[in-house]
Amino acid sequence: MKKILGIIFLGLLLSTNANSVITNFKKGTFHEGDVYWKHRKITLPPGKWESVERWGWSEGFWDAGSVTLVQYTNNYLTAAFSFGEIDFKGRYQGYIAPLIDEILYHDPHDGCYERSEYTLLKLYKKGKVHNCFIVSHNETYKEFYRPDDSESKVYSAVLRKWIKDRNMKLPKIILCTEGVYYAPVVRDTYYSWSYCIDPETYGANKGKFFTEETSEYHPSNINNFPDKKKFMDDWIVTSAKLHKSMEVNLKAKELHKLDFSEYNIGQINKNNKISSSSNLAEDIKALKQLYDEGVLTKEEFEKAKKKLLN
């Protein structure tokens, strides 16, 4: 999902106007809980995160930036979280919309369409609105050093240098979730994020197969490994909660939000608190609070309340 950021970034590498706007994420600083990216709050996954990569620039009708944070133990990388955006300032939709469509749905190596290596894909696509959620596993060394898409090596260059300088060891297989939200009717900004973990650090049994195709976590193999299937199911729930949190923080419209009802994770309010899906009265009360505070329009409130009642 970083590719659309990378394409525009590469086109402006020689610009003399490039400058950093992400002052809160200086390299080497640590963050946890809620952080503030420009005009939006982002709730980081649990724990302390070190900032290892950031960039930002403004050129013509767009601003863009990205930050990457990591967790590690004894020079062993255990998790990575990244977030980026391109703010188009409401111009040149005739050029922007086809570009986004091309990247998300026609890239031969990655995108918001069904692929054999994806464990789960959820998508809302209507007109210029895109809300995409992907859960997958990755062969870490391949992802960093010999990806299918050779251009993606450019996007991870800074992180690879940090890994080399720190003599950091990498897990062989990582589980990842990626998200995209773009809705000009909310804000003319393209958002993307990803969160990856080493499953063994988070409690999974040690793996035996370490290529993308042979990994126990590959959708074609996972049903033969009940322990890995259980861990992946739990990771999907964790990933869905993160995606719902991002939808709230980015003020996604109710009709744009993805349906995660099968995971019984309840509602997430603007403070990123999850209410029990079984407590209907509390859910409606939380919706009413969002309406009273102006987060939801009357139409959105009534539609969400109707969905709960049904």
Image (tube, helix red, strand yellow):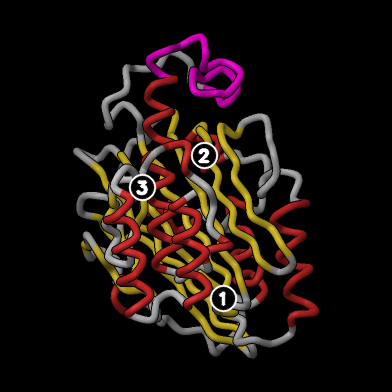
Residue at x 65% of width, y 71% of height? 8
Query: How far separated are the C-alphas under marks 1 and 3?
Result: 27 Å
Residue at 37% of width from left, 25% of height from top? 231
Q: Which residues are magenta?
A: 211-228
Q: In this image, 193 relative to 206: left or right?
A: right
Residue under numbered circle 1: 189
Q: Using the image, tell me which numbered label, if any, was put on residue 135.
A: 2
Give whichever of 30, 227 is nearer the camera: 227
Q: Residue at x 41, y 19 (%)?
A: 228
Of 3 and 121, the residue lying toward us:
121
Mark 3 lies on residue: 266
In the rendered view, tell whether residue 81 sits above or below residue 260. Answer: below
Q: Nearer the viewer, mark 1 or mark 3?
A: 3
Near mark 1 (Cα within 10 A), the count class, few <14, some 14-19 or many ≥20, is many
- Let me know if residue 227 is in the magenta part: yes
Specify the quadrant that holds the N terminus. bottom right
Q: Position of residue 109 (x, y in %)?
A: 70, 43
Q: Would you say residue 83 sits in the magenta stretch?
A: no
Tell me: 146 left or right of 295.
right
- In the image, residue 45 above or below residue 184: above
Mark 1 or mark 3, earlier in chain: 1
Say what secondary structure mark 3 lies in.
loop
Measured in 3D between alpha carbons, the distance from the residue under mark 2 to the one under mark 3, in whole angstroms, is 20 Å
Corner quadrant of residue 146: top right
Would you place residue 247 above or below residue 168 in this image? below
